[in-house]
Image (cartoon, rainbow, N blue to C red):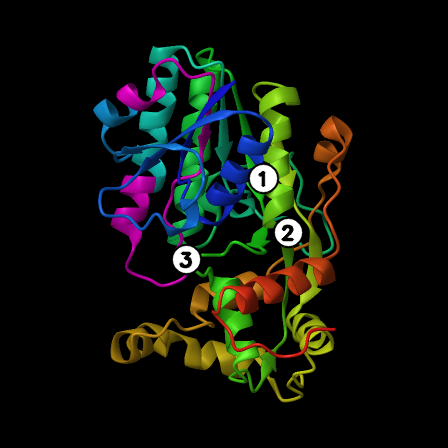
Amino acid sequence: MKAVITGATGHIGNVLVRLLLKKGFLVRVIALPGESLESLEGLEVEIIKGDIRNIDNLSQAFQGFDYVFHLAGIISILPGYKKILEEVNVTGTRNVVQVCQETGIKRLVVTSSIHAFKEPPKGCYINEACVVNPESIYGDYAKSKAQATLEVKKGIQNGLEAVITFPTGVIGPYDFRISEIGHLILDYLKGKVKFYIDGAYDYVDVRDVAEGLYRLAIQGRSGEGYILSGQQVTVKEMFDLLGEITNIKSPNLKIPMLVARAVAPLSAWWYLVTKSKPRFTPYSLFTLSSNSLVNCNKAKEAFGYQPRPIKETLRDTVSWFYETGKAVIKTIK
């Protein structure tokens, strides 16, 4: 079997490459010119330079392949990225859909986001029956993922063989580019986390997401969407688990959400001045205070999806950061 992966150098992407190679796939990846290939070093993959915004690049890459896993996209919790989000997440996905139809790909597997769904009231589960409507959700990133999802649905209505996945907050090892949550974990390991705020989110292991993508390529029903979630964890619980794993004291100082929200608008200014990523922006605070009660029963029933416990994921992530020298080695329980 042969698969093309867009966004293969990213967190989910490079883990999926590793999994598909173990499954005996011939793997081709599309990487931007000049993009770091560190996450793919030592892996037997064919690398084609290209951009999903360029249809000709995609046509050349998809020819003769069975599956396309579309993961390329821009993620941003900062304001001011609307244009690039639309160009890459929306137009790029539209291009992928078009070329898959033109080249007769066996199946397209698209990674959307849990944020593409309209959020139900707190206490109600987010599931695949929730509406995907860009006008009813908050944030440029979420809107772009909803619009991209609708582009795939249009393709499905026109006969495209495709499935859509909706991961929650992805976390885990092989985080070469250092994700938002990866930065937070590294800050914790470096002793920079001095407080916590109220709020919670659902986090899923990157390896479970990769397994889900593979299973849905083989077993998923075309035209369907599947949530790939993990475990709902509060900010305090996250830090306490990291404290248990590392012996680094978990912070006891709680910053009220109202105070955090009052300061958050300064995050863009802070980024410009320090060139360091702010952890708590208006969008991230909105996310942490929103409904993160997620149901992944559809994936469980479809292919036996079973996400691992968050503590196992955190332990493996911390170990990977230490092993790769991204954090100073300390005792791990």
Q: Earlier in the sequence, mark 1 or mark 2?
A: 2
Q: Are marks 3 and 1 in contact (CB under 8 Å)?
A: no
Q: On the image, numbered disc 1 is attached to which residue?
A: 210
Q: Which mark is residue 204?
A: 2
Amino acid type, label 3: Arg
- Can the viewer see residue 130 in this picture? no
- Residue 27, image x and y in percent? 45, 28
- Which tag, 3 or 1, sits closer to the chain's start? 3
In the rendered structure, the answer to whether residue 304 lies left or right of residue 260 reads right
Q: Estimate how packed mark 3 is, as few (under 14), some (14 to 19) or many (20 or more) residues with alpha carbons within 10 Å.
A: some
- The residue nearer to you, when weighing 106 against 143, is 106
Q: How many marks?
A: 3
Q: Residue at x 69, y 63 (%)?
A: 233
Find the distance from the CA under tag 1 to the CA under tag 2: 11 Å
The three-letter code of the residue at mark 1 reads Ala
In percent of the image, x 55 and y 69: which residue is there?
Answer: 322
Q: Residue at x 63, y 37 (%)?
A: 211
Q: CA distance from mark 3 to mark 1?
A: 17 Å
Q: CA distance from mark 2 to mark 3?
A: 18 Å
Element type at marker 2?
Answer: strand
- Amino acid tagged 2: Val
Whether pointer 2 and pointer 3 mark residues with C-beta atoms closer than 8 Å, the reply is: no
Q: Which residues are magenta?
A: 59-88
Residue pointed to by mark 3: 177
Q: Nearer the viewer, mark 1 or mark 2?
A: 1
Q: Residue extending furthest front?
A: 42
Q: Which residue is located at x 59 percent, y 33 percent?
A: 22
Q: Is residue 222 magenta?
A: no
**Front position in the image: 93 or 140:** 93
